């Protein structure tokens, strides 16, 4: 016996599912509707749906309708078993002998419930099996090919809705995690700035008194060496505190038309000694056609010093640094690239470079790049890094010539590959 096809009923179910694909972002809502509509469409006694848990890979019971409670407490099924069950590759599987159907632990009870036939619809999205709907049908009958075709389309729509809802849920949870992380970082930043402020004054006192005592200590005084250590270490602490305060202060840039090549030259001259001591050769390739650009010269000089110093530290001794400036007339950008042949950065570390306090140096505070990133962003520019572990690093700074009015700064990129 075959049912006469209720095309109007098909259309309504299809419409409901299609609407859901576009409107919902809730995985649960998709699952519930898919199960109830499948049962409705097939005049089934009930239906249930297993959905693949992306973390475990197992297919877990997700929703059911119209069947007794005791059938619902089924354990998860492994992905391997489900794939074995679906080996035939059919888009719909019909089981007329419920004793022979896979995953039927209690066939007698199923029979006693009045079920005479089972129908499985796998939910594939881009060849990935996301779930499986099983319909429990009370009267054994033949299905019209058009009816089965429709069930397949329904499965495809459900898989599509499920996939979309999953993506949205993942994005939402990533976004929430990011917000939480940002809030934590900002609270931590405020706390660090508060502590730094409190420590700054006593440190200044220690430095003042110890420096005075050192000046007065005779060359052969037994206190001299100890005092020297106190002065040196206190000076180091003051430096760190100063950087921390600078970082938390968020000074808005005081922009005026500037020549970027002059700022680069100034930064290089400050680090001359550092390069000489480390036997580092610096090659300058500064373009002659650089336009005047709206910049806070002091802040930008700090960026170049941070990047050049990092490059020198990555080389340690005997190496090359190239600093290049050029105009991108098309996008009205000035570009500065600093390339070194130092130790390079591992891909895992590259994602954390701009985080405050990220450092792999015993004496580093890990604020150099975080500060530089903030300054470049305040100029509506962007800073990118390309690096290869053991193969050197290149930092690229892009700055809009006209101060970037109306230009939204793009996200920083962390490229990988050879510099
Ligand atoms: N050119 C580079 N080559 C290799 N690693 C680099 C380079 N520039 C930065 N890094 C890595 O990024 C980390 C963070 O740099 P950042 O300048 O923020 O802090 P730091 O140099 O460690 O300390 P400081 O606050 O004193 O600058 C460094 O510790 C280093 O591991
Ligand atoms: Mg640094």
Image (spheres, rainbow, N blue to C red):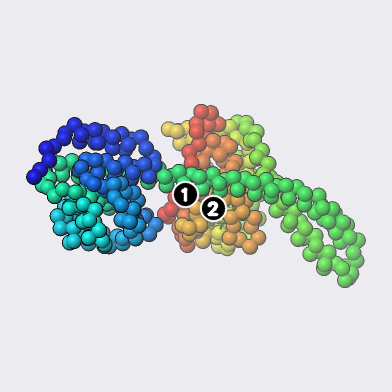
The alpha-carbon separation of the residues under discs 2 and 1 comes to 9 Å
- Residue 70 bears which disc, if any? none
- Asked whether mark 2 lies closer than 8 Å to ligand 1, one says yes
Quarter where residue 316 is shown:
bottom right
Q: Which residue is drawn at 80% across and 54% down?
A: 203
Task: Say few, some or many: other residues with alpha carbon within 10 Å of mark 2 (under 14 / 14 to 19 / 20 or more).
Answer: many
Q: Residue at x 20, y 52 (%)?
A: 115
Nearest the eye: 314 or 128: 128
Q: Which residue is drawn at 24% across and 33% down?
A: 12
The answer to whether the residue labelled 2 contacts the one labelled 1, judged by CB atoms less than 8 Å apart, is yes
Please name the residue that numbered disc 1 is placed on.
414
Please name the residue that numbered disc 2 is placed on.
353
**Dot 2 lies on which element?**
loop
Give left or right: position of 389 versus 210: left
Nearest the eye: 11 or 128: 11
Quadrant of image for the N terminus: top left
């Amino acid at each position: 016996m075959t049912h006469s096809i209720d095309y109007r009923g098909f259309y309504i179910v299809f419409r409901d599912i299609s609407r859901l694909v576009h409107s919902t972002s809730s995985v649960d809502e998709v699952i519930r509707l898919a199960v109830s509509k499948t049962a409705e469409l097939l005049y089934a006694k009930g239906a249930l749906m297993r959905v693949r848990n992306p973390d475990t890979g197992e297919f877990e019971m997700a929703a059911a309708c119209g069947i007794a409670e005791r059938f619902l407490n089924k354990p998860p099924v492994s992905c391997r078993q489900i794939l074995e069950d679906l080996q035939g590759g059919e888009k719909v599987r019909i089981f007329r002998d419920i004793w022979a159907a896979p995953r039927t632990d209690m066939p007698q009870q199923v029979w006693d419930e009045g079920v005479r036939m089972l129908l499985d619809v796998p939910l594939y999205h881009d060849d990935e099996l996301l779930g499986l709907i099983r319909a429990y049908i009370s009267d054994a009958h033949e299905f019209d090919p058009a009816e089965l075709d429709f069930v397949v389309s329904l499965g495809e729509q459900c898989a599509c809705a499920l996939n979309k809802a999953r993506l949205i849920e993942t994005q939402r949870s990533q976004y929430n995690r990011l917000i939480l992380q940002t809030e934590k970082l900002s609270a931590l930043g405020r706390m660090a700035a508060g502590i730094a402020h409190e420590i700054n004054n006593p440190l200044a006192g220690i430095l003042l008194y110890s420096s005075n005592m050192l000046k007065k200590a005779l060359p052969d005084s037994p206190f001299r060496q100890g005092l020297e250590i106190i002065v040196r270490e206190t000076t180091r602490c003051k430096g760190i505190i100063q950087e921390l305060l600078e970082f938390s202060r968020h000074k808005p840039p005081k922009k005026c038309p500037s020549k970027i090549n002059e700022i680069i030259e100034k930064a290089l001259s400050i680090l001359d000694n550092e390069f000489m001591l480390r036997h580092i050769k610096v090659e300058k390739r500064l373009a002659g056609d650089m336009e005047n650009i709206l910049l806070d010269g002091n802040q930008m000089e700090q960026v170049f010093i941070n990047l050049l110093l990092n490059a020198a530290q990555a080389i340690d001794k005997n190496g090359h640094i190239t600093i290049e400036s050029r105009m991108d007339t098309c996008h009205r950008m000035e570009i500065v690239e600093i390339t070194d042949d130092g130790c390079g950065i591992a891909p895992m570390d590259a994602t954390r470079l701009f985080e405050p306090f990220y450092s792999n140096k015993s004496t580093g505070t890990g604020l150099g790049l975080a500060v530089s990133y903030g300054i470049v962003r305040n100029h509506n520019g962007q800073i990118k890094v390309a690096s290869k572990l053991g193969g050197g690093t290149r930092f690229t700074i892009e700055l809009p010539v006209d101060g970037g009015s109306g230009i939204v700064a793009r996200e920083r990129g962390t490229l990988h590959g050879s510099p």
